[in-house]
């Protein structure tokens, strides 16, 4: 991967999927911004706007406006061009 995209990971601390996504990024040394939607109401509303009114986490947003909601490890790997 030649350039790391800017990534924002919206989630919460009790969600296993949020923990899994953070671990994936950390293990692959991929920088990201973490936003806990339980502590940031504006971020929670943003996640709801992306997910048809649902607070589905993790919701991961790239700087190009694309997003993944509740992605598997394989989906993250494909999106980032890294091995799962």
Image (cartoon, rainbow, N blue to C red):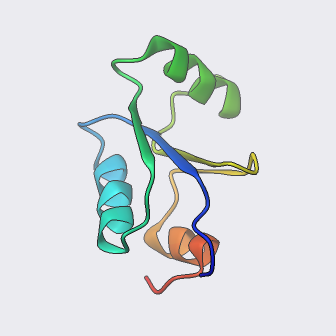
Relative placement, left or right, of 53 versus 20 is right
How many numbered markers are drawn? Answer: 0
Relative placement, left or right, of 16 versus 58 is left
**Quadrant position of residue 20:** bottom left
**Quadrant position of residue 24:** bottom left
Q: Residue furthest front?
A: 3
Which residue is at a point 58% across and 17% down the rendered structure image?
A: 45
Which residue is at a point 43% across and 65% down the rendered structure image?
A: 30
Which residue is at a point 52% across and 22% down the rendered structure image?
A: 43
Q: Residue furthest bottom?
A: 83
Which residue is at a point 48% across and 65% down the rendered structure image?
A: 72
Quadrant in which the N terminus is drawn: bottom right
- How far from the left and from the top, in percent, is residue 33? 44, 43
For the residue pair 5 and 48, the one nearer the viewer reads as 5
Q: Residue furthest left?
A: 14
- How far from the left and from the top, in percent, is residue 12? 33, 34
Q: Is 49 located above or below residue 30 in the figure? A: above
- How far from the left and from the top, in percent, is residue 31? 43, 58
Quadrant in which the C terminus is drawn: bottom left
Q: Is 38 located above or below residue 31 in the figure? A: above
Q: Is 28 located above or below residue 83 in the figure? A: above
Q: Residue furthest top?
A: 41
- How far from the left and from the top, in percent, is residue 68? 61, 53
């Amino acid at each position: 991967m030649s350039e790391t995209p800017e990534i924002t990971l919206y989630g919460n601390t009790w969600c296993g999927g949020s923990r899994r996504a953070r671990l994936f990024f950390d293990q692959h040394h991929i920088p990201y911004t973490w936003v806990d939607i339980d502590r940031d109401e504006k971020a929670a509303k943003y996640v709801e706007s992306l997910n048809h009114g649902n607070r589905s986490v993790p919701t991961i947003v790239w700087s190009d406006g694309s997003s993944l909601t509740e992605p598997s490890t394989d989906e993250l790997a494909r999106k980032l061009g890294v091995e799962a």
